[in-house]
Amino acid sequence: MSVPEGLLDEGVWFRVEAAGTAAAVRRTAERLATDLAMPEQRIAELSIVAAEAAGNLVKHALQGTILVRAVRTPEQAGVELIAIDSGPGMVDVAHSMGDGHSTAGSLGIGLGAILRQASRWDLHSLPGRGTVLAVQVWPEAPPPPFWAAGLTRPITGETVSGDAVAAREAGGRRQLLVCDGLGHGGLAAAASREAVRVFRQTAAASPAAVVEALHRSLGHTRGAALAVAELDADAALVRYAGMGNIAGTVFHPDGSRRGMISMPGIAGHQRRQIREYEYPLSPGAVVVMHSDGLVDRWNPADYPGLLTRSPEVIAGTLLRDAGTRRDDAGVLVARLP
């Protein structure tokens, strides 16, 4: 069976509340791995990971969801699962990872089995808030951890999201894009996908120049709000240029935060002068960008240890707690190695 349309791009979300959905997660992961030509042994191990991750949500969690998607490098492709729930959370994460621990009368081997089969994993859990688990299964030795990761989710009732996120390294520049196509549904998604395509193909240039190129390319679409950030470790700076309602924030290890400025406008249609701003980037700082499908009133102090976790886990936590179901949502998180 072929992979469902879109699975190789944004991935597929499942709301996991029953055993039947958990089985669908496993089958989808297996189909994706087959299309990616992963070895049979790794597909079998991925099947265990998917079944246990989804089964844990059915048995233990509140409001559990899982994203199944491809992850790629120029050398190989693997499968990533991101499992998100709203409780009950783990009091002692290290103890919960040991075989034999259970809170629902099962054997308690699910999390341990996941971690043994995975190429890479990370999680964050708080009692009363829930758990976010990110797991990758690669056919061979895993690549270094990704420096940026993002998630998108459609508004309730739609099957595609009008938000899109992307990261690239071009000409020595590490750059991020968050795009929010106007409205919802297929036309909004088409605008954002065109922005991602142009972003990936545009020659290395400053964020302001990239935003200008995106503006010129979106005239035949519905238009979008979008922003481009560049993380420059040598200069210890973030360079940022945006049009419309895209939020960007730098979170520093000392607990301080700095919001970044986007100018009014609609890429492809209404443009004022595009301005580029610079912000300090301290070692270990985390850059978060998101559409207006997430609120920005969350407080990192309420999530001890979260900003030290992987970009995937940070993005999943923010999507869960700051995302709204009344709009498309897109969030992108980056931390330089």
Image (spheres, helix red, strand yellow):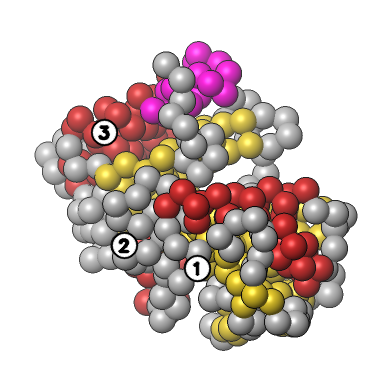
| Magenta segment includes 34 | yes
Mark 3 or mark 2: whose residue is earlier in sequence: 3
The amino acid type, in three-letter code, at marker 1 is: Ser
Give the Cα distance between marks 3 and 1.
30 Å
- Quadrant in the picture for the N terminus: top left
State the CA–CA distance, disc 3 to disc 2: 22 Å
Q: Which residues are magenta?
A: 28-42
Question: How many marks do you count on the picture?
Answer: 3
Q: Residues within 10 Å of mark 2 (few under 14, many from 20)?
A: some
**Position of residue 210 measured from the top left corner of the image (x, y, whole percent):** 77, 64
The answer to whether residue 18 is visible is yes
Q: Residue at x 78, y 48 (%)?
A: 201
Q: Is residue 95 left or right of residue 238?
A: left
- Circles 2 and 1, Cβ within 8 Å, touching? The answer is no
Give me the C-alpha separation between circle 2 and circle 1: 13 Å
Query: Which numbered tag is attached to residue 325?
Result: 2
Q: Residues within 10 Å of mark 3 (few under 14, many from 20)?
A: many
In the rendered structure, find residue 188 and report the number of the disc placed on it: none
- Contact between labelled residues 2 and 3, with CB atoms less than 8 Å apart: no
Q: Which mark is residue 22?
A: 3
Farthest front residue?
A: 220
- Per the rendering, the mark at residue 291 is 1
